[in-house]
Image (cartoon, grey):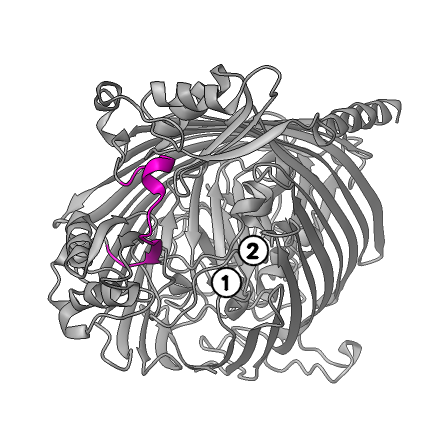
Amino acid sequence: MKTLLKSLFVFSLLFSSFIFAQTITKSTFMVKGECDMCKERIETAAQKSGATTAVWNAESQKLELEFDPTKTSADLILKNIADVGHDNEKYTASAEVYEKLPGCCHYERSPSFLSAETKTEEPNEEYFVRGNCDMCKARIETAAKDAGATEAFWNAETQKVSLEFDPAQTSADVILKKIADVGHDNEKFSATDNMYKKLPGCCLYDRDVALGVKGSGVHSDSPKPKKDFSNYEDHFQKSLEEVRVVKLADATALSKKETGLTFNIGTKELLKAACCNLSESFETNATVDVSFSNAVTGTKQLKMLGLDQKYTSLTKELLPSIRGLAAPYGLNLIPGRWIGGIQLTKGGSTVVNGYESITGQINTELLKFNEKPETALNVFADANGRLETNITSTTQLNEKWNQSVLLHGNATIGKIDSNDDGFLDQPTGNQINAAYLLNYNDLENSGWGTHFGISFVKDERFGGQTDFNKKIDRSQQNAYGVGIDLSRFEIWNKTGYIFKDKPYQSIGWMNQFTTHQQDSFFGKRNYWGKQNTFYSNLVFESIIGNSNNKFKTGASFLYDQFDEHYLTQNYQRTETVPGLFFEYTLTGLKYTLVAGARTDFHNLAGTQFTPRLNFKYDLSPQTILRLSAGRGFRTANIFAESQQYFASNRQIEILGNGGKIYDLKPEIAWNYGASVQQEFKLFNRKASLVADFFRTDFQNQVLTDLDISPQKIVFYNLEGNSFANSFQTQLDFTPARNLEIRLAYKYYDVQADFAGGKRQVPFMAKNRGFFNASYSTDKNEKDAFWNIDATLQLVGQQKLPNLDSNPAAYRIPEFSASYATLNAQISRNFNKKIRAYIGGENLTSYTQNNPIIDVQNPFGSYFDAGMIYAPIMPANVYVGLDFKF
């Protein structure tokens, strides 16, 4: 306790020193430049001239300075900046120095920022104009000058054209109309479809998403993008000034800016499949493996880097979500149509978000207001008797407030037994789910923003034998039944503040309370569990000298209260975890280094130190190398995380070693990774290749041993070695217009020293192949188009548990057979408002033979429905309709 108080006291002193720093002169000046090399040169020159802080922004061309007027002056700073080659509003660089700058730093010198030259009656205005390449740039600027502009400069990255013109001779409307006439949509006029289609292939920009996003856009009557504080990913991971909702141009985009290997999955990707809930959101993604957990509950589990879902941090709005008792069924509680986007990071993530991430982090964003109000209705049905309805509404209440209302309901009414073994292939039941989000954004004025959310879900499922009747007491019937009753309530708030005149400095505070309860039975076995969780995270972000040296620091607190009943046993525990963290980001011309560490004071697991390191180096603009290493720890929830084996007559046995959680010690793991991202031209179109390797080494891993006896599940801490090697290579390319192809291969080597010796971890295929193709037709004048998507997955052999001590009829082979699954979907957008789709899952109709062992005697010693390695349901067809209002 003394150590904790001492650490908190030291932290508070450091924190206070940042907030109450000395006030000095602050000024903003216009300085010309182009790239990150310019940024470093300008900021370095300013600091050498005596500036205490210098932050230059390439898009605004503004330099924000802080300096002590007793030691230097603005004139001296700007004179020295001009001396290294950068024109500014007081001094011009010499032609000799300017010419010596690297080619990428050669900015446009006319018009000048100098006051003598800026005293003009010609307006200087900026407008969004869509385009892609240098040919677009030449066409746009030529059209603008032909329409009377004296100067025109279009930037492909910002998608903005800067115009100077004499209002007596022309106008912005005339110029923008001329630009549209040559094929380029802008914020006032749209090009005709005929003119757009005549553009060269490299100039065919995306006309579907927001203006200002490279390669994408919306219709010309859409308002300009505004900052939106409702999306908090950047708020707590980057800088509060960068927080905004941006619709991704690509369905899945691998970020080139992030230090970690991060994939941004947008709504376009999510609409490629049925995507009824979060577990189905990765069916077209090559990184995450999705599989059924057992033969009676119908639930799916994720695996990443060759390890179970429990080793991946699953967050919602960057707050802890699917963890603890929610692990087995939590993926089913986040409806797919509520998802605005997903960020998937492989390997160790930032220490700011906690200590539990080992193989990576998957963060889910909920739908929020984006530029204009939208209400959507989705209805869905499949051949197996599943019905679903989603209603989502995002509206703006006033200039600063907006809200989201999210509603979901589903019911499974079909009793399907496709293999006639007497057991339902999937449980029947229903779910009611609702959430409300309220967002306030006044970042640009007062600097304040806040996000509030509340949600509730009730889910009830019944499975087992087809003769089981949920309305009859189990003691009065002989049929084997499974019942799972879930309820979950969450309330959260995230509030942030950007310091006035310091856009690089911010503070944010996140708080969340969750209660999750499960009441279930598996045959004659009862399991009841309840978890109450409170989470708080305070983050302060600023810079050291300039924006090349950033840091985040703060404190977190996690409170978990568990109460579990299994058969006649009761397990209760309370975990309290205060923690401190610090993360430093160093940005150079070609590299970014993120080094962080946190210390958590766990009341049951002891003090834990968690360092993490991520490094990105741009070998060239098209080649990126990433390295990562880090530590994580977690406390195992053995009952919740092993429920896929509860539908059996295995007895649970815990071989304790004096630990304070189920008599077991906490799990500790180190993860190391390296990846190369290469962009190139294939079929004269953009393509990307990513190859990555990750290794995870465990200490005190809690092993689930199914091999000691077919009649037991034995839990114990690892004594020896346990590792997971993961290699993946993925190719994304567009062989023809509107056709996207994704190919991937994955190799896993996952082994552990079990009690009986070293062996492969079961239910993990060493080899997996992946193929996805997506084709869209061109939109017509009503914005109607077709989309066709198909995903083929090849799954190699998997090591299966040893059941050799069973009678011959109840044994399984040492390895499973390889198999393939095919999912496909065809959708038709009739216009902006109506979309219909039809699809199929597991169209190869491959199913596991005899998935339930000793199916005729569900209360006998050999009954086991947990030995699942392949689909248990044949081909399934679904249909759906989307309406927007």
Quarter of image, res 539: top right
Position of residue 209 relative to residue 585, above or below, is below
Q: Nearer the viewer, residue 47 or 552?
A: 47
Q: Which residue is mark 1?
A: 340
- Answer whether residue 25 is visible to the viewer in this image: yes
Label 2: which secondary element:
loop
* Residue at (27, 41) in percent of width and height: 689
Q: CA distance from mark 1 to mark 2?
A: 10 Å
Label 2 Cα crowd, 10 Å radius (few <14 / some 14-19 / many 20+): many
- Residue 715 locus on image (x, y percent): 68, 41
Label 1 Cα crowd, 10 Å radius (few <14 / some 14-19 / many 20+): some
Q: Which residue is mark 2?
A: 231
Outermost residue to the right: 2
- Residue 188 locus on image (x, y percent): 32, 68
On screen, residue 566 versus residue 232, left or right, reads: right
Magenta includes 523?
no
* Residue at (59, 40) in percent of width and height: 357
